[in-house]
Amino acid sequence: MLTKRSVYLDHSATTPTDPRVVEAMLPFFTADYGNSASAHSYGRKAEDAVETARETIAKVMNCSPREIIFTSGASESNNLAIRGAAWKAGQGSHLITTAVEHSAVINTVNQLTDVMGFESSYLPVDSQGSINPSDFEELYRLATAIVSAMLVNNEVGTVQPIADLADYAKAKRVYVHTDAVQAAGQLSLDVHQLGVDMMSLSAHKFYGPKGVGLLYLRKGIDLYPSQTGGSHEEGRRAGTLNTPGIVGMAKALELAYQEREMRINHFRALRDQLIDGVLSRIPDVVLTGHPTNRLPSHASFLIDGLDGNSLITHLDLRGVAASSASACKTGNPEPSSVLLAMGYSPKEALGSLRLTVGLQTSPEDIDYTVDILGDVVARLRKLNAAFQLTSMT
Ligand SMILES: Cc1ncc(COP(=O)(O)O)c(C=O)c1O
């Protein structure tokens, strides 16, 4: 029997806040608590901190500080980009996205389409979850206002060819938005290299605090705000700025890009150890997503004959925190639409498992996880076989 460990392998869901980030944030909860919109010295101190954070972030993204709009996270940023561009273009305009986006994009596009009079089309993906940028030309219409495609898929880790897609879109003067939530901290966020007009980030995915994010909005683009109220963020997003959160996000992003090489080497080595261990030791398992063009920290699998819900529950009992695209709290898992779009059957898609490594993960954690996963899979398969036998008699 293995000695039980606690292994957190769900860094794509969220990361712990780096203690250096917490330290940078603390004064803005206590001594320096002013509202950055206030005209007195307390307000100016908060405003200075926000503007310094904006400059730090702008350097990482190779953009102007004024092109950054602070939000409550990527869900809000995605809403602002897509709704803002669609509303500005006017009812009846057309939106393009991909078949594998996060629900913050898909549900926004669906609502605009189903109840607000807009039209939409979806770029398909291949069996590894990659879009083909030239498909844009087939979906493009004169009324197309925006194309929104994620930089890295959260379920299967595939990196999308956003710069190529942007070339096609720019040729037709269509705005390009990317949800870069999963890429942040690992891939380049240089908006000029990516060729994007808008980009969403969320701080808690790169060792920053929860509840704060941003939208990069290229200078000259005029969106309708999706959240109206005061004139914060130059009228583009109403609401008192989350000074501690913004300071923490800037610190986390700065650290991530200062330490990027060390971090991605660490992630890659552990991810490859995990993928090799799982594929070589556990039968009837496949890797999902692109085998090489994937996020350094991301491993995802389909475990034949099992469902993700029971897998993650049993892994949790043995100390391993994982996730599954088909996990749900109602006992009635739905197959992941991402895996269906990649061509897997609903039955295959139910067996999805995502394991994402982080800064604190060790090679021993990976050895333990492979052992535990092998054991859990063997036991659940045995149980299923026994259940099938008894239900036949
Ligand atoms: C790809 C992607 N987009 C958007 C989000 C939403 O981020 P938040 O919940 O921080 O708003 C997530 C979070 O899981 C994500 O993975």
Image (cartoon, helix red, strand yellow):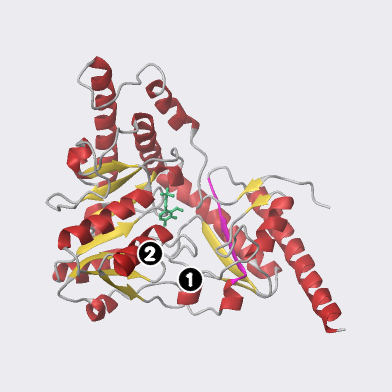
Q: Residue at 14% of width from left, 70% of height from top?
A: 171
The amino acid on which the numbered mark 1 sits, given as a three-letter code, is Ser
Is any part of residue 219 visible from this angle?
yes
**Could you tell me which secondary element the residue under label 2 belongs to?**
helix
Q: Residue at 31% of width from left, 66% of height from top?
A: 115
Q: Position of residue 304 (x, y in %)?
A: 66, 74
Disc marking residue 106: 2
Q: Position of residue 237 (x, y in %)?
A: 25, 42
Is the residue indicated by label 2 positioned so its CB lies within 8 Å of ligand 1?
Answer: no
Q: Residue at 75% of width from left, 62% of height from top?
A: 376
Is any part of residue 197 visible from this angle?
no
Query: What range is drawn magenta here?
Result: 350-358
**Could you tell me which secondary element the residue under label 1 belongs to?**
helix
Q: Earlier in the sequence, mark 1 or mark 2?
A: 2
Residue with the most extreme front position: 115
Packing grade of label 1 (10 A; few <14, some 14-19, many >=20) is: some
Q: How far apart are marks 1 and 2 (CA)?
A: 11 Å
Judged left or right of residue 339, residue 361 is: right
Quadrant containing the C terminus in the rendered view: bottom right
| Residue receiving disc 1 | 337
Q: Pick whichever, 165 or 349, lies toward us.
A: 349
Q: Are marks 1 and 2 in contact (CB under 8 Å)?
A: yes
Determine which quarter of the picture holds residue 348. Answer: bottom right
Q: Where is residue 182 in the image (x, y as percent from the top left)?
A: 42, 54
Q: Is residue 361 above or below residue 160?
A: above
Q: Where is residue 130 in the image (x, y as percent from the top left)?
A: 40, 72
